[in-house]
Each structure stands twice: as structure tokens, then as C-alpha cells.
Image (spheres, helix red, strand yellow):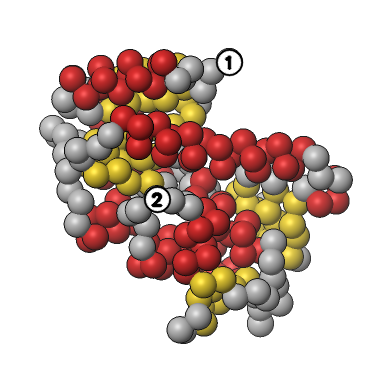
Amino acid sequence: MPEKILVVDDNKSICEILEFNLSNEGYAVESACSAEEALQKLTSQHSLILLDVMMGDMSGYKMAEKLRREKNPIPIIFLTAKDTENDMLTGFSVGADDYIAKPFSIKEVIARVKALLKRSEIKQNGAESLPDAKRRLAFDDFIINFDTKEVMIGNEIIALTRTEFDIITLLASNPERIFEREEIIDNIWKDSPYITERTIDVHIGRLRKKLGDKASFIVSRPGYGYRFNNNPK
């Protein structure tokens, strides 16, 4: 079954262009001309949202915030003419996984869609090939489950975006190793030109906030980067 993508943009021509080209790549594509319409169409069967920022009553930022408040982890790529660093950081702070500035090339959009969906596929296939004992990481009551792509603290599931899950997995799979910000970018986003070191700090800040009392698992080393502390005090 093809992966389903929801394109959300108040410019009908952009929706049609993206729908045509992504369909040619084998994806099942739906489009919506407003955030409100998109929320009505969105289901658990969708794998990714391509989301415009500047729209009528509800902006793309507001839609993303709403989904994340509802603990919906669906990957979101913003498509927007707002391309300053602060605009991008705002997008990531509300839960975006990637950010593409307008005007964009169709080839770039397709490449970024494939890259984001591939991250999940690789992790799923990798988890299936692991022995049961290695399909999760456990640090007392802090558990990372590779099968369900969930983080649990005690009996509570912590709702993480795909990017947040990828970051915590990268750090926790290599406990005590310090990852420079550039290393995290290379591991998670690779060739994305819009990801900066400040972007990493925004994602880490969101991640720590969600981890609450377990935020001390992620340690910052000023001038170096971040590491996972598997024995926090």
C-alpha cells in the first residue's frame, strides 16, 4: 500500500503540482486548501504532511501546534516563503521535522519527502532484525522502544515527533559519547541546507521539556555538543 501524503496550501496550483508529482513517485496524495480542511481530512493512515505556513484563519504554525498538543507525531515539512533563520526556528519549535523555502524545486521536495519517510523505514527494518533484547533500550523506568517508536517513562508514553525520537535514539544508543551539533545534523538530516546548529538546540529544548524529570538524561557540553547520561543523579 502506498504511503499517504497530505498537501496543505491555500494556493490551489501548488497543491495540484505537488499532488501530480508526488503521485508519479508512487505516493497516495490528498490536498487541502486550508488548515481547517486538512484537520478534517487527516487520518492515522497519513504518513506525512507538506504544510504551508501562511494561510487564512489558521496558519500552518497553529495547525502544527494543535497536532503536537494532541500528541500526534506525524512528520511535518513546512513549505513557506518565510525563510529567515528565525522563521525556520519558529517552525521547528512548533514541531516541524523539516523546512523547505519557497520557491522550491519539485526535485528537492521529493528528495526531502523520501528522506524523511526513509528514516522511519530504516529504523523499523533495523528493529525487526534485532534480537528481542535489543529492540528496546531501558534505563530503569526510561524505555525507548524501537518497534513502536515510543519513549516511555514508567507507564506514561511520551509523545515525540519523529525527529525528536531520532535524536534521543541516536544519543541513547551511544551513551556517554559526545555528539557535536554537526554530527547530529549529519545523522538526522544529512544534506538539508536549512538545518543549523541553533536548530539542534531548539529540538533538544523541546525534547528535554517533554522528558520532564528525566531531562537530565540529555547533557549539554558547552563548546562540544550533547551526550546521553545513562546514570543521571
State the residue at coordinates (59%, 68%).
214
Three-letter amino acid code at the position of disc 2: Ser
The location of residue 205, given as percent across then percent down, is 43, 66
- 76 or 209: nearer the eye? 76
The location of residue 229, given as percent across then percent down, is 65, 75
The location of residue 117, given as percent across then percent down, is 52, 35
Question: Which residue bears the numbered disc 2?
Answer: 192
Q: Is residue 74 visible?
A: no
Residue 172 figure quarter = bottom right
Which label sits on residue 144? none
| Tally of numbered discs | 2
**Quadrant position of the N terminus in the picture:** top right
Q: Decide if residue 221 is on the left or right side of residue 134.
A: left
State the residue at coordinates (62%, 47%).
150
Label 1 Cα neighbours within 10 Å, binned few <14 / some 14-19 / many ≥20: few
Q: Decide if residue 116 is on the left or right side of residue 34.
A: right
Q: Disc 1 on helix, strand or loop?
A: loop
Q: Is residue 17 above or below residue 191?
A: above
Label 2 Cα neighbours within 10 Å, binned few <14 / some 14-19 / many ≥20: some
Mark 2 and mark 1 lie on one chain; the one further toward the N terminus is 1
**Quadrant position of the C terminus in the picture:** bottom right
State the residue at coordinates (48%, 17%).
26
The location of residue 222, given as percent across then percent down, is 46, 84
Which marked residue is nearer to the observer: mark 2 or mark 1?
2
Q: Disc 2 on helix, strand or loop?
A: loop
Which label sits on residue 1? 1
Three-letter amino acid code at the position of disc 1: Met
